[in-house]
Image: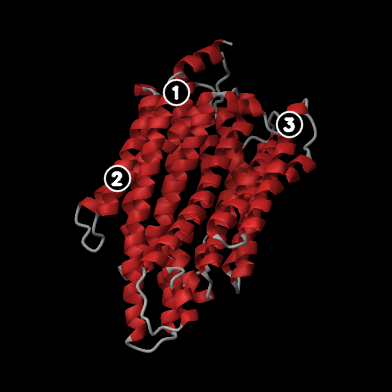
Amino acid sequence: MFAVIPRRWLILLAVMLAFLPVVIDMTILHIAVPSLTLALGASATEVLWIIDIYPLLMAGLLVPMGTLADRIGNRRVLLTGLVVFGIASLLAAFAPNPALLIAARVLLALGGSMIMPCVLGIIRRTFEDEDERAMALGLWGMVGAAGAALGPLIGGALLEHFWWGSAFLINVPIMLVVAPLVFLLLPRSEETTPGTWALGQALLLIAGMLALVYGIKAAVGATQPLGVALLMALLGFALLSVFVRLQLRSATPMLDLSLFSRPAILAGIIMAVVAIGALAGVELTLAQELQYVLGKTPLEAGIFMIPIMAAAAVGGPVAGYLSNLCGLRLVSSASLGLSAVALAFLALADFHQPGFGVPAMLALLGLTLSIGLTASSIAIMGSVEASKGGAAGSLEATAYELGTGLGITFFGVFMSSVFRHSIVLDAELAAPLAERAARSIGDSYLVAKGLAEPQASALIEAAKAAFSDTHSTLLLTSATMVGVLAVVVFFMLSGYRKAEAVHESG
């Protein structure tokens, strides 16, 4: 038996509101990329770092911050994270160059890494009943998706009238409202885990994650010599190996590695990484397709993307209901399978004349991926006892952020490669200019600004044609990945109910 917390739904409201600005920040940036690129003169590499330094750094910070929250209390860490996030947003809004914007995004990652594991850990501790927990996680997913839906729309409206920094500045008033609500609604006394917080292990994990991911990024993107990239990847692997050995030998490890032995948790993590990675890549390229190729304003692009985000907002509660009704295995695999179908349709669709089909498929994609991601939360949080909710929450949040970061990195590099091979440039264009124009559609626009007519118009038309081909290839690749994931998850969750029953009886 378990005790029912009377204020549990008010507590859920508080943590959902705390999570909202983190999600809004992630999707606002997608709409702001074209404006930001042109205003700061950022290269394709700098744009990728501006976007993915946030999720990649968070991937290393989440587990240490989740453990810190278990030691000193979720409320304290959550409030600190909200303050840091607000200050970082202010700095990012007024960054005068790409380097300082990247630095501000690092600080944003620090604040976000304090917020996310606390939110999931509090939900797990507050809702012991399995059906209530599924609905609570569904409502959490709904608020997250609603924030993501508002992000492009708010960002588009802001960029219609203000400079690109307003996309970050909007977080400041949100924090001024959310932080006092969290302060008032969350209980001041909470059970904490005894022991000290191992700063050395935390730094080891952060350094290992960053070195490994940077090595992979440098190798795939060819931004560094292959030897340097491999050396960084090996260094990261070595540091993470030392971290794992320390965890196995410690009586009170920072991360309970036995959690990875539970199939439902492993399936949930894989589901989160691949699905959120595909979604992040699709959203980013769609925002560029709409503005660069179709010539839509930021506001028009945000409105065009409403179906995918609005449908995603509905997916959370639907996932909670269907999981209780039909079982997690069927809901997870079926939702991912339908996501793959929607992606394949969009890859072959004509965005110049979307008709009814494109908005409908965008809505189906948002709905099904949201259901799949909420199902991953149910699988992970439903497979651990309440005392390990913080650790499980940090693992899930890490999967989300790592999936976003790697998704944007791999898709960005893949997109640049396909774009480079697809674009047909004027033979009279100077070699240095041709080399830059072939890197990305943003670089093509920057090069065209310095050319005379009709050469400038010809370059832009060539870039538009190449990017449309690139976008289609990317969507087909995403469809394949998500389709394979649907089959993998179906087999990995085959014993979920049985394993859960054994766990509960134990």
Q: Does dot 3 land on a helix, a strand or a loop?
A: helix
93 displayed left or right of 84:
left
Q: Position of residue 321 (x, y in %)?
A: 37, 28
The residue carrying pointer 1 sits among few (fewer than 14), some (14 to 19) or many (20 or more) residues within 10 Å by Cα, namely: some
Q: Which residue is mark 2?
A: 342
Amino acid at pointer 2? Ala
* Residues at marks 2 and 1, CA–CA distance in whole angstroms: 30 Å
At 63% across and 33% down in the image, what residue appears?
A: 390
Q: Along the line of sight, which residue is nearer the eye, 448 or 228? A: 228
Q: Along the line of sight, which residue is nearer the eye, 196 or 184? A: 196
What colour scheme was applied to this rendering of the protein?
secondary structure
Q: Is residue 209 visible?
A: yes
Q: Position of residue 376 (x, y in %)?
A: 47, 33
Amino acid at pointer 3? Gln
* Residues at marks 3 and 1, CA–CA distance in whole angstroms: 33 Å
Q: Is residue 167 above or below residue 437?
A: above
Q: Which mark is residue 131?
A: 1
Q: Position of residue 404 (x, y in %)?
A: 51, 49
Amino acid at pointer 1? Asp
Q: Are marks 3 and 1 in contact (CB under 8 Å)?
A: no
Q: Are marks 2 and 1 in contact (CB under 8 Å)?
A: no
Q: Which residue is mark 3?
A: 247
First in sequence: mark 3 vs mark 1: 1
The N terminus, quarter of image: top right
